[in-house]
């Protein structure tokens, strides 16, 4: 059966410093993950054809760099836009915008960053991606935390309230195999 693979990009320099958003390049550990990915994918896919989708941000493109498959960049796969908070750490946000910080905690799915997006906004802009995923054969998406939570949430039938809290660690390949009802999920963690 066909399957859909998901992975966050390798660790970025912003992940290292705890900043959100931005367009940082990979850290040395992130580069190691991008080098480990081709074998991990090949072990699972065997010789089947596949297409790799990335966002337009450098950290996903760099993570896909050593994968030898046709590739497509989607702007719709870019990370949730944190607006005024882009490039800040959660601590800095809590200090500078305490009310926003508290509101996000209260309703993470609906909270929209000033000048940016909410999880709800991301779900809406992902609609064409989901439609295309339903039609395609094997796809690997190299994406971002919030965006992958929304896509996986859709395929796993998660409730709206759970989506923003779904655990999607770095350096982990997730394999979804659609079944008649729901999907099987497997996870492969690369220790770096
Ligand atoms: O920290 C990585 C990151 O992808 C940020 O760019 C993004 O704002 C965040 O994760 C989304 O996660 P959360 O919604 O839990 O803040």
Image (spheres, rainbow, N blue to C red):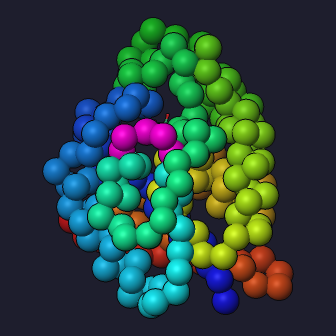
- The correct choice, above or below, for 175 with respect to 22 in the image is below
> Please, which residue is most extreme toward the front here?
70
**Picture quadrant of residue 153:** bottom right
User: What's the magenta region?
Assistant: 55-59
Q: Is residue 185 left or right of residue 55?
A: right
Q: Say whether residue 150 is left or right of residue 182.
A: left
Q: Residue furthest left?
A: 28
Residue at 61 percent across and 52 percent down: it is 149
| Rendering coords of residue 95 (x, y %) | 43, 12
153 to 11, vertically: above or below:
below
Q: Give the quarter of the figure containing the N terminus.
A: bottom right
Q: Is 126 covered by the magenta stretch?
A: no
Write the residue at 66% across / 76% down: 137
Whether residue 145 appears in this view of the structure is: no
Residue 187 is left or right of residue 68, and the answer is right
The overriding secondary structure of the stretch rendered in magenta is: loop
The residue drawn where x is 20% and y is 61% is 32
Q: Position of residue 10 (x, y in %)?
A: 33, 54
Which percent across, then down, holds residue 70? 48, 65
Above or below residue 40? Residue 9 is above
Q: Is residue 90 above or below residue 185?
A: above
Quadrant assignment, res 87:
top left
Of residues 162 and 117, the one drawn nearer to the viewer in this rendering: 117
The image shows residue 89 at horizontal and vertical percentages of 37, 25
């Amino acid at each position: 059966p066909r399957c859909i693979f998901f992975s966050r990009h390798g660790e970025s320099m912003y992940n290292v410093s705890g900043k959100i958003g931005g367009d940082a390049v990979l850290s040395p550990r992130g580069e190691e993950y991008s080098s480990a990915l081709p074998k991990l994918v090949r072990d699972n896919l065997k010789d089947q054809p596949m297409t790799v989708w990335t966002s337009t941000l450098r950290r996903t493109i760099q993570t896909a760099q050593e994968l030898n498959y046709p590739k497509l960049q989607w702007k719709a796969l870019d990370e949730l836009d944190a607006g005024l908070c882009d490039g800040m750490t959660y601590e800095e946000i809590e200090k500078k915008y305490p009310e926003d910080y508290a509101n996000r905690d209260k309703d993470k799915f609906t909270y929209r960053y000033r000048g940016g997006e909410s999880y709800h906004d991301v779900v809406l802009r992902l609609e064409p991606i989901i439609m295309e995923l339903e039609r395609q054969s094997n796809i690997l998406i190299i994406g971002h935390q919030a965006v992958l939570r929304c896509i996986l949430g859709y395929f796993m039938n998660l409730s709206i309230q759970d989506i923003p809290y779904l655990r999607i660690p770095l350096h982990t390949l997730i394999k979804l195999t659609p079944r008649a009802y729901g999907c099987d999920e497997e996870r492969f963690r690369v220790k770096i």
